[in-house]
Image: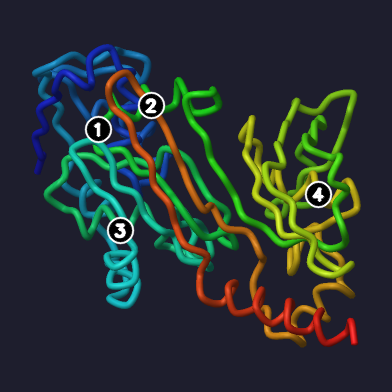
Amino acid sequence: MLKTFKTDIEDNGKRFDNYLIKLLKNVPKSLIYRMIRKGEIRINGKKAKALDRIWENDTVKIPAKLLKNKSEGVAPVWLKNLLRDSIIHEDNHVIVIDKPFGVPSHGGSKLKFGVIETIRQIKQDEKRIDLVHRLDRATSGCLVLAKNHLILKEMHKIWNSDKVKKVYTTLVSGTVPKKLTVIKTNLKVERHNKIRKSIRSNQDTGKVSETEIISNRPISNRYSLLKLSLKSGRMHQIRAQFSYIGHPLLYDQIYGDSDVNARCKELGLNRMFLHCSSLRLEIGKYQLFIESELPNELHQFLKQTRTHAHMEAF
């Protein structure tokens, strides 16, 4: 049994394999390519190759068994409710989530459902929803999802330009010098095993990564409350850079200081102190500005550290 799909103008010129990978989100890529090679997925009734292009109003027929695989699993009710309540902006082009700590941007081998899989189930009337960018599971704050391929493509073009400003709030160990306003390092992925990888500074072969410190407020001599603007968008950029300069983020389980983390846990912090607090972007006439308040658990910890620092002064 075959299921028929009609392509539209957003799909013009797209490679057949990429179209299918987007359409069949939860189907293994190896299975998709195998079905293409066998001719079981067709364009306009004919066998197609992975690198063939598709165009508006093409007819794509897909075996029903693939769609069954695609639709397997339903996001937990608690996660649907959590993310439904976390939508802070929606228009014809985007959905913006105030992503909670602990929820991944997308599912993986350990967690089947992340933001994107769950929002697609919540917003089933939307033909297409895609992540514009990602936040680490341990990071909270503004996360943008595109409602169509055209806006996704345009946002990817400008994402690391001056037309987009992403501001993060973080609390780091130690007193960051006021004269330090920009951190510029070359970062490179280091793979430790098949699953775990991290980012380290490598001035010879790493990718240029730049972070601007736009606000720096010391809290006693133990911590610095910072607002940061990313000029590039590398994996773990903020976390790796501040660890490199000797001021790791509080409760960072990969790049942090174990003694500092232990002290923070005693004071009630059980998550990394990193939050995407605002996002501004401009695409032609379309403008978007979103703010997200510091989550309650970070706000309470910050309040407690200030009180603790005040008591230590006496």
Q: Which residue is depicted at the point 54% across and 23% down?
A: 161
The residues bearing labels 3 and 1 have C-alpha atoms spaced at a distance of: 18 Å
Sequence-wise, the earlier of marks 4 and 1 is 1
Instruction: Answer whether labels 3 and 1 touch (C-beta < 8 Å).
Output: no
Q: Depth check: give the residue in front, 129 or 252.
A: 252
Which label sits in the foreground, 2 or 4? 2
Amino acid type, label 1: Asn
The residue that label 1 is drawn on is 148
Three-letter code, disc 3: Ile
Q: Earlier in the sequence, mark 2 or mark 4?
A: 4
Choose mark 3 or mark 2, whichever is in front. 2
Q: Which residue is mark 4?
A: 242
- Label 2: element kind: strand
Identify the residue under disc 3.
Answer: 87
Q: Which residue has dot 2 on it?
A: 282
Measuring from the top left, give residue 1's x and y in whole percent: 9, 43
Q: Residues within 10 Å of mark 3 (few under 14, many from 20)?
A: some
Q: Earlier in the sequence, mark 2 or mark 1?
A: 1
Q: Residue at x 50, y 46 (%)?
A: 134
